[in-house]
Image (spheres, coloured by chain):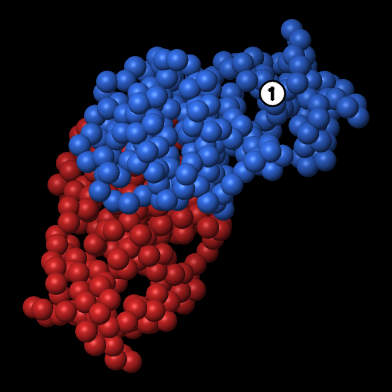
Chain colours: A red, B blue
């Protein structure tokens, strides 16, 4: 069944509008009587039958309501140093499937990709679309927050005060991610800081340790690309708290 | 320091030939006196100084020998249903960085990509190149085995008899990967079977359970793309046995 993000919901009906409506009418070409699955980021999903197809809205009669146990319990955020090419796109796509709670694109000293102003906002919109698609593909019912491109000094304000910060760092030889997770509370958010292509500058790691009380951790002896490190850390954190089966 | 796969090694020297030599002379353009790192899939690596640059070989004097603790202890193989587009490429690249022992491309009922004969062999050669590059990038010293495209009936012969087989399957609701790993021996190889785009056909899962004693496992409630499932299972297996920090 095709899945759509719904724009409004009453007791017995929900509405699909905007881009989602365009997708329904012009891409998958559904007509009255067709069944669709709607979600609204509240955690529920609703099977609806298309009753009315107007130019600006599709009205669907709700025939089934579900609150599927599909979202991860642990709230793991990725904070990604801006990386070139398709790296961000695919971390967002795969990270959404796996169950990340959100992603913050971060300007770092060694980021080759520079994003400011309108260019940054356009890119974030594109990333949000990729996440929205991945939510449907993976049958999640809550979209991860893909936040605006941030600087180091803004980070603390973007996540709850209880957030537990991790920073994989190749010079960290003592403490493993696994070991540090043992001291972390699944009921508070976890944010994993991932460097761009060149990794983090030592002063950035020091800043995160001091200002965010981030724990620097090792992901093992092999050098991982930024996108590989991001997904590995996400999988390890979600798996540790039982969110990957 | 640039890393090269060496073709032969004496007590005090090693030689770089073929494609590796071409890369040394024409791509990174090194000359006599330059230091290079050589590896030969034996587990060691050697720092050498280029002493002689001939048309068919570069002879390097060994100035340092190391046996770095960089390879994963657990030997985890991915058996990937042939998938379209760049999916195989990137599982091979990322899987190599993470520390997989090898990959077997598998013809499955629902594989859209069909590879036979010369076409299959050419593709495998390309995949082996991608793995070789990822070995250098991640500073591994042993290349993963990227095997020929196989059919189900060939699988058993390709890995040791003690191999412990896992098959993530979306209809498996009871047993998680994590739980099944608890019964597995890190000293024996682990092979994870990953379906192509359409997943495995039920009869393929039944065959793997009967003929390979594969345990079907759940990767959680979210639907993962084939390439995401492959990396998630690999990370979980390597992390479980302490190979990712």
On the question of residue B92 being in view, the answer is: yes
Rendered view: B200 above or below A22:
above
How many marks the image carries: the answer is 1
Q: Residue at x 70, y 29 (%)?
A: B4
In the rendered image, the residue lying farthest to the top is: B11
User: Which secondary structure, mark 1?
Assistant: strand
Q: Residue at x 49, y 32 (%)?
A: B152
Could you say where residue A170 lies in the image, as x and y percent from the top left? 46, 35
Could you say where residue B20 lies in the image, as x and y percent from the top left? 76, 32
Decide if residue A229 is on the left or right side of residue A139: right
In the rendered image, the residue lying farthest to the front is: B203
In the rendered image, the residue lying farthest to the left is: A11
The answer to which of A74 and B64 lies nearer the viewer is A74
Could you say where residue B219 lies in the image, as x and y percent from the top left? 30, 41
The C terminus of chain A lies in quadrant: top left
Could you say where residue B76 lies in the image, as x and y percent from the top left? 44, 27
Q: Residue at x 59, y 47 (%)?
A: B114
Q: Which residue is mark 1?
A: B38
Q: Residue at x 58, y 17 (%)?
A: B43
The N terminus of chain A lies in quadrant: bottom left
Quarter of the view holding residue B186: top left
Task: Name the chain letter of the residue that bears numbered label 1.
Answer: B
On the question of residue A150 being in view, the answer is: no
Rendered view: A172 above or below A105:
above
Decide if residue A222 is on the left or right side of residue A156: right
Quarter of the view holding residue B143: top right
Rendered view: A146 above or below A205:
below
The answer to which of A219 and B77 lies nearer the viewer is B77
């Amino acid at each position: 069944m095709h899945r759509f993000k719904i724009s409004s919901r009453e007791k017995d009906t929900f509405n699909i509008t905007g881009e989602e409506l365009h997708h329904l009418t012009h891409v998958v070409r559904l007509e009255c009587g067709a069944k669709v699955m709607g979600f609204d980021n509240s955690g529920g999903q609703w099977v609806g039958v298309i009753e009315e197809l107007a130019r600006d809205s599709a009205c669907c009669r709700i025939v089934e309501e579900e609150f599927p146990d599909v979202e991860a319990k642990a709230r793991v955020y990725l904070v990604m140093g801006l990386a070139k090419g398709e790296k961000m796109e695919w971390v967002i796509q795969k990270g959404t499937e796996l169950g990340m709670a959100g992603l913050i694109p971060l300007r770092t000293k060694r980021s080759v990709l520079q994003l400011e102003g309108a260019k940054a906002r356009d890119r974030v919109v594109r990333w949000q679309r990729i996440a929205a698609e991945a939510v449907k593909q993976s049958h999640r019912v809550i979209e991860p927050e893909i936040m605006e491109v941030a600087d180091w000094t803004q980070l603390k304000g973007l996540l709850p005060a209880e957030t537990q910060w991790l920073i994989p760092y190749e010079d960290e030889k003592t403490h493993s991610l696994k070991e540090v997770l043992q001291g972390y509370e699944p009921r508070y958010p976890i944010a994993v800081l991932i460097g761009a292509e060149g990794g983090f500058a030592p002063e950035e790691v020091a800043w995160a340790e001091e200002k965010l009380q981030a724990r620097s951790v090792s992901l093992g002896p092999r050098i991982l690309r930024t996108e590989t490190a991001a997904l590995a850390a996400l999988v390890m954190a979600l798996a540790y708290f039982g969110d990957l089966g």
